[in-house]
Image (spheres, rainbow, N blue to C red):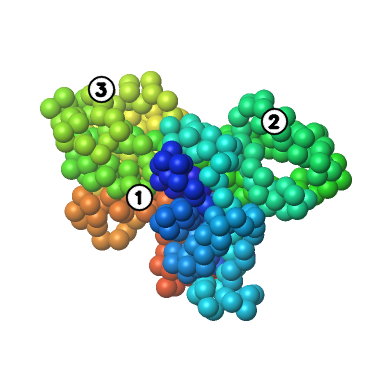
Amino acid sequence: MFDIADEVLARLRAGTPIAIATVVGVQGSAPRAPGASLAVDANGAVIGSISGGCVEGAASEACSAVLDGGAARIERFGISDDAAMSVGLMCGGVLDVLVRDISTDAASRRALEDAEIGRAASLGTIVAGPAALVGRTIDSSDDAGDAAAMDAEFARAGIGTIGAARLRSVVRGAAASGRTGPVTIECDGAEVVLFVETALPPPRMLVFGATDFAGALAVAATHIGYRVTVCDPREAFATTERFPQAAEVVVGWPDEYLASTTVDARTVVCVLSHDERFDVPLLECALGLPVAFVGAMGSRRTTDRRRAALADRGLAPAVLDRLHAPIGLDIGASSPEETAVSILAEIIASRTGASGAQLTNAVGPIHATDPPAGPLSG
């Protein structure tokens, strides 16, 4: 549900009842991964999508039924159901969808508010186990009152406080991983399936070189969930007016800034400056950091010259192999906007392990059954 957090919170703050349908299981090919959500408020407004259009109508009806007083439940849509063709899931997959009213659910609201302010957030929802607990949510907070209520609720369901504590531990641990999916847990002899949704702060993209290509990349990368920083030592070029979509514009020497800023395993570094005074020391620094992707723009000749200079500085071949240069996939891009698409396509393919080949010539399912955590995980 974190993919629609802002709009859901707006309804909750206005006191408008709202129900959410969340994909909690996928079999075969399906257009959206677990965690994708659709919500319907008491006024009939629909937010988000769980299938790209295939089953939205049926999911919306299920949300409305829950708002009318129905219990939380799992709905299945897919080719194994008689109703599959009528709801239009034509891609050959099966979706398990949890439908629940979150209007007064404190755990869901706390998790949504964490995600809204860019804090790591996680929420667990029981999707299988004792019937009385299906739909019960658990967040990662230390709310003593909620924990006590959960312990009592679990005891009544025959699981006990040990089971409740284990589920809370799983949800807290998930906040650091960024993974969304089901977890099966043995609790006092009862098997409980907890669907865990997570949201991590937006990953960073560090773009070096205040060029037109950097501007186009900042716009496109922001749209897919990156928090973009543009850095250039030239004060006249590195301005917020030139890069309004960037979260941050830094005037500074590139390698010094990179060495001093915070990066992690999801950070992407894109060098678009075309200036060896900056590029070589910057790439040497970047390739020594535990980041997800390092790419550099330039011709074949420029790329070969950079690689030779980096090798002269002692970088091993295995380290140089991490450098994506020339950056981008071969799609015939020429304008800054087209080049941004090319660069982002390579970054996504690198993150997911995909080939970047045409789907027309590919074999197997189009949609990965277990996609790696990405910028918008959760």
Q: Position of residue 130 (x, y in %)?
A: 78, 50
Of circles 2 and 1, the one toward us is: 2
Q: Which of the marked residues, 2 or 3, is nearer the chain's N terminus?
A: 2
* Residue type at the position of mark 3: Gly
Question: How far apart are the two marked residues, 1 and 3, measured between alpha carbons?
Answer: 25 Å
The type of residue carrying mark 2 is: Ala
Residue depicted at 25% across the width and 39% down the height: 245
Residue under pointer 3 = 252
Question: Tag 3 or tag 1, which sits nearer the N-term?
Answer: 3
Quarter location, residue 232: top left
- Is residue 374 or residue 260 the one in the foreground? 374
Q: Is residue 139 left or right of residue 299?
A: right
The outermost residue toward the front is: 68
Structural crowding at the residue carrying mark 1, measured as other residues with C-alpha within 10 Å and reported as few (<14), some (14–19) or many (≥20): some
- Mark 2 or mark 1: name the one nearer the start of the chain: 2
Q: Is residue 322 visible?
A: no
Which residue position is annotated with label 1?
A: 344
Q: Secondary structure at mark 1?
A: helix
| Secondary element type, mark 2 | helix
Q: Residue at x 29, y 48 (%)?
A: 220
Kindly indicate whether the residue at mark 1 contacts the one at mark 2 (C-beta within 8 angstroms).
no
Which residue in the structure is indicated by mark 2?
Answer: 147
Which is more toward the observer, 95 or 57?
A: 57
Estimate the spatial distance between the alpha carbons at disc 2 and disc 3, rounded to whole Å.
48 Å
| Relative vertical location of residue 195 with respect to residue 320 in this rendering, above or below | below
Furthest toward the right, the residue is 189
Of helix, strand and loop, which one carries label 3? Answer: loop
User: Where residue 150 sits: x, y (%)?
Assistant: 72, 36
